[in-house]
Image (cartoon, rainbow, N blue to C red):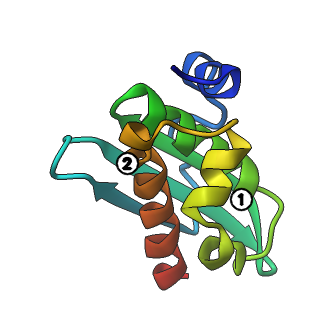
């Protein structure tokens, strides 16, 4: 059901944990399934130098949060607004329709961060 990329990010999440010197952080949730995602970034000279997350959720939510931090790191702040649910899902080898909520949660967090920085 899940791609090898999804399983890899779930079993070996990248950038998981707190980011004590974060420039901005947000917490978003999906009230339907109960998943909660905290996303934080460190910004220097308009570029995201680090991104980290904490997620209490399903396999897909954790994998999407992990992959999002990879896709954001090293990019300019505009990336928070540009990245899409489809791009995130495709970067993980695709997601079954019934699990797309994980990608939506991650993108909601990116958009919320964009409003804060």
SS for tag 2? helix
Foreground of the two, 93 or 44: 93
The answer to whether 107 is drawn above or below residue 66 in the figure is below
* Comparing labels 2 and 1, the label whose residue is closer to the camera: 2
Which picture quadrant has residue 12?
Answer: top right
Residue ranking furthest to the top: 11
Left or right, 33 with respect to 94, comes to left
Badge count: 2
Residue 15 is at least partly visible in this image: yes
Residue 102 percent across, percent down from the top left = 42, 44
Label 1 Cα neighbours within 10 Å, binned few <14 / some 14-19 / many ≥20: many
Q: Which mark is residue 97?
A: none
According to the picture, the residue beneath numbered tag 1 turns out to be 72
Earlier-in-chain disc, 2 versus 1:
1
Residue 55 percent across, percent down from the top left = 40, 38
- Picture residue at 63% right of the left edge, 40% below the top: 94
SS for tag 1? helix
The answer to whether 91 is drawn above or below residue 78 in the figure is above
Residue 101 percent across, percent down from the top left = 37, 48
Q: CA distance from mark 2 to mark 1?
A: 19 Å
Label 2 Cα neighbours within 10 Å, binned few <14 / some 14-19 / many ≥20: many
- Picture residue at 49% right of the left edge, 73% below the top: 111
- Picture residue at 40% right of the left edge, 50% below the top: 38
Foreground of the two, 19 or 16: 16
Foreground of the two, 5 or 27: 5
According to the picture, the residue beneath numbered tag 2 turns out to be 101
Left or right, 69 with respect to 1, comes to right
The answer to whether 34 is drawn above or below residue 103 in the figure is above
């Amino acid at each position: 059901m899940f791609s090898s990329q999804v399983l890899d990010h779930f079993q070996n999440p990248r950038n998981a944990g707190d980011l004590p010197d974060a420039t901005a952080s947000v917490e978003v949730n999906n009230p339907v399934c109960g998943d909660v995602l905290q996303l934080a970034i460190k910004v220097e000279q308009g570029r995201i130098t680090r991104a980290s997350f904490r997620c209490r959720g399903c396999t897909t939510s954790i994998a999407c949060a992990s992959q999002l931090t990879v896709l954001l790191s090293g990019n300019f702040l505009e990336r928070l607004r540009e990245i899409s649910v489809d791009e995130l899902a495709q970067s993980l080898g695709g997601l079954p329709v019934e699990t797309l909520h994980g990608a939506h949660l991650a993108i909601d967090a990116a958009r919320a961060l964009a409003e804060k920085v």
